[in-house]
Amino acid sequence: MSSDAGPGGGRGAADDRERRARRRPDRSPPQSDVAPGHDQSAAERPLPPYPDSLGPRVFHAAQWMRDPVDLLDRGGTDHDVFRAHLLGVGDWYQLCHPDHSKRVLLAEREKFRKSEDFGIAFGDGLLTVEGETWTRQRQTLQPLFVRESVRGAAGTMVEQVKRRVDRWTDGQRLALQSELTDLTLDVLFAAILGRELALDGDEKVRRAAEALHDWFVPTSYPLPQWIPTPARRRFREGKRTLQQEADRLLEEAARNPPDDPAEADDLMRLLAALRETDAVDAGMPSDEHLRDQMVTVIFAGHDTTTTSLTFALWALAEHPEVRERFHAEVDALDGPPTAEDIEAGRLEFTDRVVTETLRLFPPVYGLPRVADRDVTVDGYRVPEGERINVVLYRIQRDPRFFDRPDEFDPDRWTDEFRQSLHDFAYAPFGGGPRICIGRQFALLEATLALATIGRDYELYYLGEEGDDGGPPLSPQMTLRMEAGQEFLVTER
Ligand code: HEM
C-alpha cells in the first residue's frame, strides 16, 4: 500500500499532510507486544507519550471540549499510540493503527471491555452488556437484522423517505441535517419499532431521541459525573420519555404478539413475544431490560444514519462529476429504488458513494473500551482499568492505507483495492463479534434514501466551509456536521 499523500483537503495545511506522510512509516516502535529490550518486564515498559502537538496536558480537556476529532487527528498524525489527559476522566489511551483495532475488537477482545458510560446511559441494552448476556441478546436480536429480514423493510424505507422528501420544493433552503434526523427517525420507527411517526408531529419523541446523545457531548463528558450539566439533564428527560414510549409500544405489541418470537417482524413484537415466553433465555429478564433494548436501538440506529446521509449529500453537492454519475445511475432505474436494484448492481456507484462517505466521515469516530488487564501495545504499557479509544477517524484517513486520504473518491473502491486493504483499515461499523448489528439496515437505508432523493432533486451546499475546505464538523457522540448548514433544493 502506498503511503504517498496526494492533493486534497484534510484537517490542517498541505505541509501538515506532507509531514504526516513522511513521518508515518517510522514514527512508532515495532508493532508487537515485545518491548524494546527483551528483558524489560511489562511493568517497566513506558506509558504512551502525550504528543507535543497537543501542548501541556492540562489543556487537553479544553481541546477535547472544543473539537475532539481535531485533537485525535493531531495526536494520531505522528503516533499510532498516544495518551490524552482529560481532567475529571483521566488519561485516555488512543490507538490509531488497524493492527490495534484488530487486537481490541477481535484477536484479543477478552482483554478489553466496554466502558461504563454506556451502561450508565443505556442500562442493559445490546450496546452495553457483556459476556453470556450479550451472547443471548445478540442471538435473539440477530434474526431481525440479517440481510433477508432487512430486505423486507426496503419498501417501508422508500415509502417513509418519499413521504417526507415529496414535500421539498424547488428553490427551498433546507437545514438538511435536522430534516434528515426526522427522516431517519421516521424510517427507524416504521421499519423496526412498528409505529409510523406523524410527519409534523411526535415532537416529544423526536426531541427525546436527540437528547440521548447529550450524555456524551464533549463539553460535559470530561466533567465528573455527579455534576448535573444541562446536557445530562436533557439526556435523563429524553431517556424517561423514550422509556414511557417503550412501555406504550410494548403494550400495544402485546395485544397481538406472535406465538413464536422467531416469527416477529419488528423489534417491539419480538420483545413482546419474549416477555410472554423466554425473556430470561434471551438475556432480557425484566421489562426494564426490554425498555433498555428499545432505547439502545433508537440511540444507535438513527443519528449514525443521519450523519452518513448528510455527509453523502454534501459530498455529492461539492463534487459535480461524482454528482452527475450518481444522477445518471439513479435516472436509469425503472422506478423508485428497490432492494433488487441494489442486488442486481444497478446502484453500484451510489453504494460506493456511501462507502467512501463512511470512510471520510465515520459517524462513530472512535470506539471506547477499558483494558481488563495490563496490555502492551507497540511496546507501550496500557495498565489495567485504563480507558482506550480505537480512533476510526484517524485510521480511515491514514496515508499508509489510503492514497490521497483526505479526498472524496468513490472510485478508489475497486474490488482489487478492497481485497488488498488491511481488514481493519476500514471499519465504520466496528469489527469482530460486536460489529454493528444494524449495518445491513443502515447500508440499505442510506443507499435507498440517496437514490430516492437523487431521482427527484439535486442539492447544492450553501453552508460554511470547515478549516480544511471540507464541511464544518461538530463531533458529538457521533461525527456530525455543524448544525444549521443549509442546502439549496432544486427539482430535477
Ligand atoms: C451508518 C450507520 C451506522 C454506523 C456507522 C454504526 C456504527 C456502529 C459501530 C461502530 C458499532 C460498534 C460499537 C463498538 O464496538 O463499540 C455499532 C454497534 C451497534 N449498532 Fe450500529 N451503526 C449504524 C447503524 C445502526 C443501526 C441502523 C442500528 C439499529 C437499527 C444499529 C444498532 C447497533 C447496535 C445495537 C450495536 C451494538 C452491537 C453489539 O454490541 O452487539 N446501528 N454500530
Image (cartoon, helix red, strand yellow):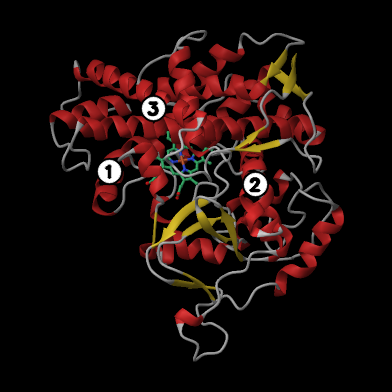
Residue type highlighted by circle 2? Ala
Q: In this view, does 197 lie to the left or right of 252?
A: right
The residue wearing badge 1 is 137
Q: In this view, does 173 lie to the left or right of 239?
A: right
Is the CB atom of the residue marked by disc 1 within 8 angstroms of ligand 1's nearest atom?
yes
> Spatial distance from mark 2 to mark 1, Cα to Cα?
38 Å
The residue wearing badge 3 is 239
Q: How crowded is mark 1: few (under 14 residues within 10 Å), some or many (20 or more)?
A: many
The residue wearing badge 2 is 62
Earlier-in-chain disc, 2 versus 1: 2
Is the CB atom of the residue marked by disc 2 within 8 angstroms of ligand 1's nearest atom?
no
Secondary structure beneath disc 2?
helix
> Spatial distance from mark 3 to mark 1, Cα to Cα?
21 Å
Q: Compared with residue 156, is residue 319 higher up or lower down, i.e. above or below? A: below
Judging depth in this view, the residue of 58 and 98 nearest the camera is 58
Residue at the (43%, 18%) spot, across then down: 205
